[in-house]
Every structure is written in structure tokens, then in C-alpha cells.
Image (tube, rainbow, N blue to C red):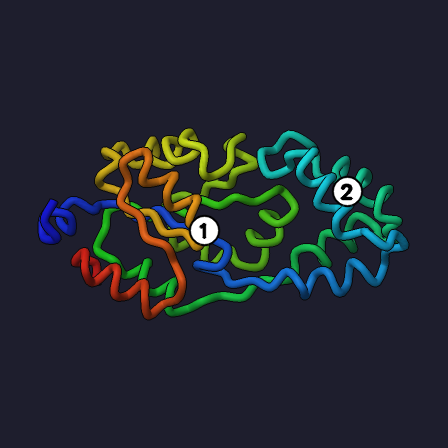
């Protein structure tokens, strides 16, 4: 497909949230969490519980997940304190937000691998960012995570457009490949400068 034809065919942008619209630093969270834990391997214990609970697919209720994690980590935080400590790690990337918001497309969708705790925080703190998109889809509400094909199809169902009409943006290569596997155009995100180049090449700037 020529660049001109490809540019004309892109009618929807589907973008990741974390490290694209909102940058984040998990270490900010872990400083607070580990300071309240007794188990010497608390961080690895947390990862094991997270993986087993599949909270990113909505398979475990947030408070149940917290109780299981707190028990194995020896964590001395209340549920409310944990939610703040584990979520307060984001900040906006205004240049990226503007590039995507101003692109001449019919649909803009956020598609995020996340969980109910982080999603609640994002909606409260960054609702003004989400409001600039037509739809905001979270993995725990979809019941599936990227790079599974089904989650991209859920996003496409909101536009009613063929896969080739979508440009997908994500900072993880496996998620980009997942989008390409279902027929979407896709770019691996690094920063606003590179994204501008990618959008310009498709006639979207």
C-alpha cells in the first residue's frame, strides 16, 4: 500500500494509556509499599499474586487481590492506603496527547492493560485526558489483555471500521505485533518526536 493510500485509509487511532498518554514510574510506588512490608521478597511475592489473580483481566475483585497480596507480603497498609500508594505514579505527556487529539481521524480510543484499582485512580485524576477520546477501554472490563486478538477486535467493534482503518500506538513491541496480527497499522511508541514523524508519514499531522 502506498503512503498516500495508507494515510487516506486511517480513520481511527487506538492508543495505549501508560507510557503513551500518561508516563509513569513504578519505583515511586514501590518505595512507599516496600517501606510498609515485612517480607524480604515482598515485591516478587506481589508479582506472583498479581499473575495468579489475573486482576488485569478482571478475574479477581480488587479487595480480594489486596488481601491476598498483603498476607504474603506482610504489608501494613489499609486497602485505601495501598490503592493510593500503588496508583500515584502517573503524569501527563501533553505533547503526545495533543498530537493524537488533533489528528484528523473519525475515532479516538484508549485501550489499556490495567486493573480496577489503577483505572479508578486514572479516571479520578486524569478524567480530563480520557474525555478527549470517544471510548476508553480497560482490560479488566474487557476480560482480556493485549496482545490477545480479542481485545483489538473489541476496540474495532466501537468504530465499525475495517482493521486497516485503525492506527494502533503502544510502547510494548508485543502489543504492537498483536495489533498488526489482526490487520491494524501500528507504531511502537517511544516519545512525542518519533510519534510526530510516524503520524506525519501517514498524513495525520
Question: Left of 22 or right of it: where is 58?
Answer: right
Q: Which residue lies under the disc numbered 1?
A: 172
- The mark tally for this picture is 2
Q: Residue 191 vs residue 118: left or right?
A: left
In percent of width and height, residue 108 lies at: 33, 48
Residue located 73% across and 60% down the image: 30
Cα separation, mark 2 vs mark 1, equals: 27 Å
194 and 159: which is toward the camera: 194
Which is nearer the eye, 125 or 184? 184
As helix, strand or loop, the secondary structure at mark 2 comes to helix
Residue 192 appears in which quarter of the rendering? bottom left
Q: Which residue is mark 2?
A: 66
In percent of width and height, residue 53 lies at 69, 34
Left or right of 28, for residue 165: left
Q: Quadrant of residue 20?
A: bottom left
Quadrant of the image containing the N terminus:
top left
For label 1, the SS is loop
Quarter of the C terminus within the rendering: bottom left
**Horizontal placement of 59 versus 128: left or right?**
right
Sort mark 1 into few (<14), some (14-19) or many (20+) by Cα contacts within 10 Å.
Answer: some
| Image coords of residue 5 (percent x, y) | 10, 47
Residue 69, horizontal then vertical, whole percent: 79, 43
Q: Label 2: few (<14), some or many (≥20) within 10 Å?
A: many
Measuring 24% from the left and 34% from the top, which residue is drawn there?
161
Of the numbered discs 2 and 1, the one sitting upstream in the chain is 2
The answer to whether 79 is drawn above or below residue 164 in the figure is below
Amino acid at each position: 500500500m502506498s503512503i498516500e493510500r495508507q494515510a487516506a485509509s486511517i480513520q481511527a487511532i487506538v492508543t495505549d494509556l501508560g507510557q503513551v498518554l500518561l508516563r509513569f514510574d513504578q519505583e515511586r510506588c514501590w518505595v512507599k509499599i516496600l517501606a510498609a512490608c515485612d517480607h524480604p521478597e515482598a515485591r516478587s511475592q506481589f508479582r506472583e499474586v498479581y499473575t495468579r489473580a489475573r486482576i488485569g483481566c478482571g478475574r479477581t475483585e480488587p479487595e480480594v487481590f489486596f488481601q491476598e497480596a498483603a498476607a504474603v507480603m506482610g504489608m501494613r497498609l489499609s486497602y485505601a492506603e495501598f490503592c493510593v500508594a500503588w496508583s500515584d505514579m502517573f503524569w501527563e505527556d501533553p505533547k503526545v496527547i495533543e498530537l493524537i487529539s488533533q489528528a484528523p481521524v473519525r475515532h479516538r480510543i484508549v485501550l489499556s492493560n490495567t486493573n480496577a484499582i489503577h483505572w479508578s485512580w486514572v479516571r479520578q485524576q486524569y478524567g480530563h485526558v480520557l474525555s478527549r477520546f470517544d471510548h476508553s477501554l480497560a482490560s479488566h472490563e474487557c476480560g482480556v489483555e493485549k496482545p490477545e486478538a480479542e481485545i483489538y477486535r473489541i476496540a474495532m467493534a466501537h468504530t465499525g471500521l475495517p482493521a486497516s482503518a485503525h492506527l494502533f500506538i503502544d510502547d510494548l513491541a508485543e502489543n504492537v505485533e498483536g495489533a498488526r496480527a489482526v490487520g491494524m497499522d501500528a507504531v511502537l511508541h517511544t516519545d512525542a518526536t518519533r510519534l510526530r514523524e510516524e503520524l506525519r508519514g501517514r498524513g495525520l499531522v
